[in-house]
Image (spheres, rainbow, N blue to C red):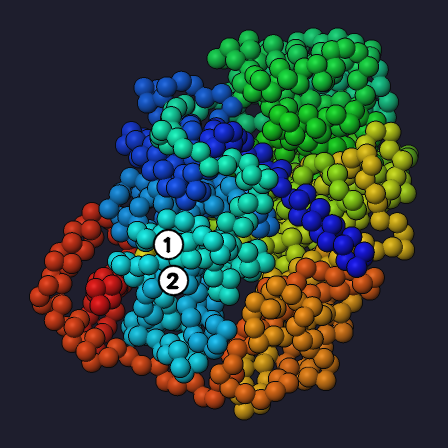
């Protein structure tokens, strides 16, 4: 029992650790029931439209009212800031933006995502109960009221639906996959997936001209894969849930499990939806109560006079960055100073985008301004900044001095404010002069200054990471190992992480180090894909003596020393080969010759800009589940998103390389990330690859132990494709608006690299000792019944294997159980009947496959019968006896023989026919008017055939509601 309690604590810590993915989104505060600081940003591609601003205000005012009632008077929106593009008229804004940027917005208004069309949605990558990344709305959804309300209902209610995803980490309570739209209840009846179960409606097969599905409760026959449940638009009794059909007038609550509350809002925990699968069959309200917003009675119900938020419109401004560089005496060790100048030079000359303000500050015993903010608009401005970089390192370490001087530079720049400015602080040691970081931090926070930090060496002050966390900045670590490229990667990541929706910034293709022998050479290849190729630059950094480089294009063109584009910078030990214009698509190769009499480390970096500013390139970004680890034993999640614009790139090979403390004896760990819906990855094929990192080691670190993360992506196996799978977002009334899956487009050979940042382990964390195992397998959340056979009395189950330690490795065995009562299985797993090996016909429970593998099991039912429901669950167990959490519940019913599905009854057809010519004419007229109001074909209007008569899907749906 004690072991079980310890494992439960570990699982709880792992989940608690995932509270904040380091994505640096705008922070929303909640105090006294009021959400403040919500940022809605309009993308620069959206044409200027004053009405769009007005509609955002109307929609969020409506949403605030619905949210207040749905949360039982516990929360509402106090204020909302709307960020408009800098290309719009100044007169539309109340003031210039400061910290507000599109890339950090909580809600983005952008072009339609091919995956979702105009369907509102929230990007979610974290486990149940953890916040989403951002809410996506389109301008048409906001401004074309007739269009949006026809398909999705009242816009304010839709925003509340999405707020459940964004703020509380809830998941949809409708079915997604074809085989999830219906289930058997505990007495064998066919029921549609919905929440609550009191939502009434009709079931029709969308693949068979909307014939009525066979859902006869007495037959026990599961409907076909095209059968869909359409809630009654009028006269519905169910009062929940906002995570299901928020468009129903009757829906005013989130579902709950409280027997004392409204039973028409009771959670339907048997339904086969993502909320049940990913949240262990808990209701939305139960999950909400575990979040900081409501935990321990926070924000209890309060009567308020008005829930209408205040609005502020601000206009985007150019980015402002100040390099705050450590030039203390310790920076002369290990060539640190020269390496910092080398990386800074590359950053200023090539990486930082045009239309950016950059300043420079140096600090040691005190701090000095080396350059005011300079607007980068071409090579001259870049060279001016390069010439202003520090030239010598000497003195003590006053980090607080550097931060204060950085604030001064920001406040002397455009707008005369520091708010929203970025300080990129690089330091290699602990502070030893006042003012300290602690003395300046409150000023940084109050003035809205963002601080990115790079810990240069393991001796760097351990406050740097926390400083970035507290100011919503990025944090990095360079270990000085012979393999780490984190220094240059960090400079690149400060730009690439903040260029979402920007098709101008460079893309990082390659970054690695190689040990070249005396008079030896290294060779390499870099694929240039069709999405990039402009301003392509190859960088080769040497240690002791100049190297010779020969670069060859796909067609055989050679660029070598002395030719145009070949640049040698002996001051920073760099060879740069610039490819003019648009680089050839294909594989570029290079040879690097080391003519020195001793070996030296050569660092190679390649970056290129998008080939077309109107089209998005393939981009890779990486984030972590947190910068600082405080739980024991330590674990972390590494996330990597690979996409082209909004469309995911799936099937790629993605690895994270984690640099560990004491690199001389602890080599880096290569961790493969997967987009398979297993373990840390919650959604299959969404372009987000992830995995748990568990290989932490106990080491002697001068300050805190740090781990640096680099992520790479390629088409190693030739399976990478760009593909819009067609996803739903908020449940529409008419399913025709859901985008059809797009044809997969092969990516071809490509390469991308990104920095994931730093993981810092806090003091007092207990590590897993050699020979011990404290980490359990991750939860399985995709257990399903693949098929059943009444004649053989067999059931085939399938799931994806999890690991030994979370999603890493291979578990020892599975503990699978069966019950005839759903509640008993979900409430008390151990009381259910174990599946013994004697009942296993195909597959086994004693030898799990490696994590990520598809498991299949055919079992013979212990007793013969028909029409009874059976429920299954399992958990993985490792060799040390650590038990993973219980999986989702899968269920099935053995039936004698499926009966043919029935079409519409004669009386139904007659009623439809009568309606076509009489009373329903009014409905047709209204529908026609709505069609006209929709913008140029944006709303799909499929034609279906009902007994020889052509009708629109929308028309049929309306008639169905009347029936």
In the rendered image, residue 831, in percent from the top left (x then y), is placed at: 67, 70
Secondary structure state at the residue bearing disc 2: loop
Quadrant of the snapshot with the N terminus:
bottom right
In the rendered image, residue 263, in percent from the top left (x then y), is placed at: 42, 57
Q: Does 149 appear above or below 179?
A: above
Quadrant of the snapshot with the C terminus:
bottom left
In this view, the residue farthest toward the bottom is 791
Query: In which quadrant of the rendered view does residue 68 lie?
Result: top left
Q: Which mark is residue 239?
A: 1
The residue drawn where x is 32% and y is 65% is 201
Q: Is residue 748 left or right of residue 733?
A: right
Q: Residues within 10 Å of mark 2 (few under 14, many from 20)?
A: some
Q: Which residue is label 2 attached to?
A: 198
In the rendered image, residue 533, in percent from the top left (x then y), is placed at: 55, 41
The residue drawn where x is 37% and y is 79% is 216
Q: Does 845 appear above or below 862?
A: above
Secondary structure state at the residue bearing disc 1: loop
């Amino acid at each position: 029992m004690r072991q079980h309690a310890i494992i439960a604590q570990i699982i709880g810590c792992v989940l608690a650790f995932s509270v904040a993915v380091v994505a640096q989104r705008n922070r929303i505060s909640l105090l006294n029931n009021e959400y403040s600081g919500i940022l809605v940003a309009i993308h620069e591609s959206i044409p200027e439209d004053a009405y769009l601003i007005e509609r955002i205000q109307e929609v969020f005012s409506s949403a605030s009212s619905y949210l207040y009632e749905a949360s039982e008077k516990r929360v509402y929106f106090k204020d909302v800031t709307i960020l408009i593009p800098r290309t719009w008229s100044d007169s539309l804004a109340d003031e210039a933006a400061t910290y507000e940027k599109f890339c950090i917005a909580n809600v983005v208004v952008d072009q339609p995502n091919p995956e979702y069309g105009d369907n509102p949605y929230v990007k979610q990558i974290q486990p149940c109960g953890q916040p989403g990344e951002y809410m996506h709305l389109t301008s048409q959804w906001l401004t074309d009221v007739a269009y949006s309300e026809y398909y999705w209902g009242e816009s304010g209610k839709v925003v509340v639906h999405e707020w459940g995803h964004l703020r509380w980490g809830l998941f949809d309570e409708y079915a997604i996959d074809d085989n999830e739209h219906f289930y058997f209840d505990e007495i064998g009846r066919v029921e549609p997936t919905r929440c609550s179960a009191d939502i009434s409606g009709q079931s029709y097969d969308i693949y068979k001209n909307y014939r009525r599905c066979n859902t006869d409760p007495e037959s026990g026959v599961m409907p076909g894969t095209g059968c869909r449940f359409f809630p009654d638009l009028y006269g519905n009794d169910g009062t929940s849930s906002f995570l299901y059909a928020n468009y129903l007038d009757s829906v005013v609550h989130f579902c709950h499990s409280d027997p004392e509350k409204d039973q028409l809002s009771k959670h339907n925990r048997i339904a086969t939806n993502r909320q049940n699968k990913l949240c262990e069959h808990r209701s939305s309200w139960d999950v909400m109560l575990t979040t900081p917003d409501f935990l321990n009675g926070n924000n209890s119900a309060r009567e308020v006079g008005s829930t209408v938020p205040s609005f502020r419109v601000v206009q985007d401004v150019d980015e402002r960055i100040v390099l705050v560089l450590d030039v203390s005496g310790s920076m002369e060790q290990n060539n640190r100073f020269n390496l910092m100048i080398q990386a800074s030079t590359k950053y200023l000359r090539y990486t930082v985008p045009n239309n950016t303000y950059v300043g420079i500050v140096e600090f040691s015993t005190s701090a000095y301004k080396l350059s005011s903010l300079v607007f980068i608009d071409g090579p001259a401005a870049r060279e001016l900044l390069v010439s202003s970089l520090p030239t010598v390192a000497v003195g003590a370490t006053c980090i607080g001095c550097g931060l204060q001087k950085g604030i001064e530079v920001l406040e002397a720049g455009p707008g005369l404010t520091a708010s929203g400015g970025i300080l990129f602080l690089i330091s290699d040691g602990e502070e030893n002069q006042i003012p300290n970081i602690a003395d300046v931090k409150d000023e940084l926070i109050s003035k809205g200054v963002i601080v990115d930090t790079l810990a240069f060496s393991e001796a760097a002050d351990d406050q740097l990471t926390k400083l970035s966390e507290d100011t919503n900045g990025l944090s990095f670590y360079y270990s000085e190992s012979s393999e780490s490229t984190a220094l240059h990667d960090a400079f690149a990541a400060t730009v690439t992480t903040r260029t979402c929706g920007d098709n101008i910034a460079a893309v990082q293709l390659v970054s690695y180090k190689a040990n070249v022998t005396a008079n030896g050479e290294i060779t390499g290849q870099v694929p240039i894909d069709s999405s990039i190729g402009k301003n392509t630059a190859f960088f080769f950094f040497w240690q002791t003596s100049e190297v010779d480089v020969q670069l060859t294009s796909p067609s055989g063109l050679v660029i070598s020393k002395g030719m145009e584009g070949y640049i040698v910078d002996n001051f920073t030990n760099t060879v740069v080969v610039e490819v003019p214009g648009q680089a050839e698509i294909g594989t570029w190769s290079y040879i690097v010759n080391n003519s020195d009499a001793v070996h030296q480390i050569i660092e190679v970096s390649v970056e290129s800009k998008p080939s077309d500013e109107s089209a998005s390139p393939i981009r890779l970004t990486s984030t972590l589940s947190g910068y600082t680890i405080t739980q024991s034993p330590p674990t972390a999640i590494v996330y990597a998103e690979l996409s082209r614009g909004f469309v995911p790139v799936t099937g790629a090979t993605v690895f994270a390389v984690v640099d560990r403390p004491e690199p001389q004896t602890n080599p880096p760990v290569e961790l493969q990330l997967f987009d398979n819906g297993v373990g840390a990855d919650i959604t299959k094929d969404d372009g987000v690859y992830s995995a748990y990192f568990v290989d932490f080691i106990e080491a002697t670190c001068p300050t805190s132990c740090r781990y640096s993360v680099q992520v790479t992506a390629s088409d190693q196996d030739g399976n990478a494709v760009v593909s819009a799978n067609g996803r739903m977002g908020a449940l529409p009334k008419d399913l025709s608006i859901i985008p059809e899956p797009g044809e997969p487009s092969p990516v071809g050979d490509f390469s991308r690299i990104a920095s994931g940042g730093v993981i810092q382990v806090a003091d007092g964390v207990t590590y897993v000792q050699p020979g011990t195992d404290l980490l359990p397998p991750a939860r399985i959340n995709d257990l399903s019944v693949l098929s059943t056979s009444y004649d053989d009395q067999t059931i085939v189950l399938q799931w994806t294997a999890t690991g030994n330690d979370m999603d890493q490795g291979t578990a020892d065995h599975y503990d699978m159980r069966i019950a005839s009562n759903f509640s008993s299985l979900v409430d008390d797993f151990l009381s259910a009947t174990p599946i013994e090996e004697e009942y296993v016909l195909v597959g086994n429970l004693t030898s799990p496959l490696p994590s990520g593998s598809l498991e299949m099991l055919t079992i013979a039912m212990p007793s013969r019968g028909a029409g009874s429901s059976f429920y299954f669950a399992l958990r993985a167990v490792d060799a040390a006896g650590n038990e993973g959490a219980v999986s989702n519940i899968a269920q099935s019913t053995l039936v004698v023989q499926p009966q043919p599905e029935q079409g519409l009854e004669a009386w139904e057809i007659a009623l439809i026919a009568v309606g076509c010519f009489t009373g329903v004419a009014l409905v047709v007229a209204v529908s026609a008017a709505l069609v006209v109001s929709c913008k140029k074909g944006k709303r799909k209007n499929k034609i279906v055939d009902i007994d020889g008569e052509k009708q629109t899907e929308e028309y049929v749906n309306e008639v169905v509601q009347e029936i």
